[in-house]
Image (cartoon, rainbow, N blue to C red):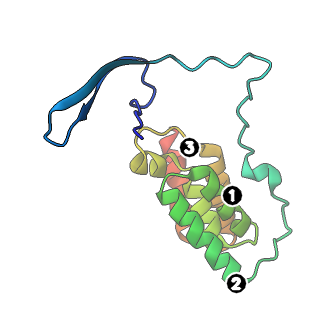
Amino acid sequence: MTAVVPPREYVGSMNLIAELHGADDHIVSSNNVILRWAPAPAKPAELATPPKPEVPPTTNFVAGAARKITPAELVALIKRGGELATNGDLPAARLLLQRAAEAHNPQAAFALASTYDPMVIKRLFPNSSAFDVTLAKAWYQKAREWGSVEALEKIEALATMNR
């Protein structure tokens, strides 16, 4: 069995010559095959699934009520969230870090804020526009309220960036 896989998003045709060689390496049979790839059909408007908007973390956060999380779970959430962020999976990282931050953990809130921070995002992922200054400031502020000393520096840097 042979599989022919075109380059990603390839549209067009390819000529394929299939040869069957005998034991003495002479051609026993040869066949020319033209393979064609057409563009994927567009989904009808009524069947198309609209993209799900990302829910800003601040809309899910209940002020004053800390989430109950064991210390081991907190460490695991922060560690895995950091790994996901480093690998570019910001939506998944944000979910885990938000869960940890809602336990009023300053480290988690700071890490969550950094996933929205344009200075961090542009340094790690130069072509990304997955930043949100408002959410970065909000989570840095929470991190500061909960004891993060370094969050103040980030808040000030974001404030000077908008000038």
- The disc labelled 2 sits on which kind of residue? Pro
Give the residue drawn at x 40%, y 42%.
126
Which element is circle 1 on? helix
Distance from label 2 to label 1 (Cα)?
Answer: 18 Å
- The disc labelled 1 sits on which kind of residue? Leu
Give the residue drawn at x 46%, y 52%.
120
Residue 41 in sight in this render: yes
Give the residue drawn at x 84%, y 61%.
63
- The disc labelled 3 sits on which kind of residue? Phe
Instruction: State the image coordinates of residue 89 (x, y, percent, origin top left).
Output: 55, 52
Give left or right: position of 10 versus 53. Answer: left
Give the residue drawn at x 70%, y 84%.
71
Q: Nearer the viewer, mark 2 or mark 3?
A: 2
Q: Quadrant of the N terminus?
A: top left
Which element is circle 3 on? loop
Q: Which of the two labelled residues, at mark 2 and mark 1, occupies the earlier sequence position?
A: 2
Tag 3: Cα neighbours inside 10 Å, few (<14), some, or many (≥20)?
some
Residue placed under numbered mark 1 in the picture: 95
Residue placed under numbered mark 3 in the picture: 131
Distance from label 1 to label 3 (Cα)?
Answer: 15 Å
Which element is circle 2 on? helix
Distance from label 2 to label 3 (Cα)?
Answer: 29 Å
Instruction: State the image coordinates of residue 76 (x, y, percent, origin top left).
Output: 62, 76
Q: Which of the two labelled residues, at mark 2 and mark 3, occupies the earlier sequence position?
A: 2
Asked whether 15 or 136 is in front, the reply is 15
Residue placed under numbered mark 2 in the picture: 71
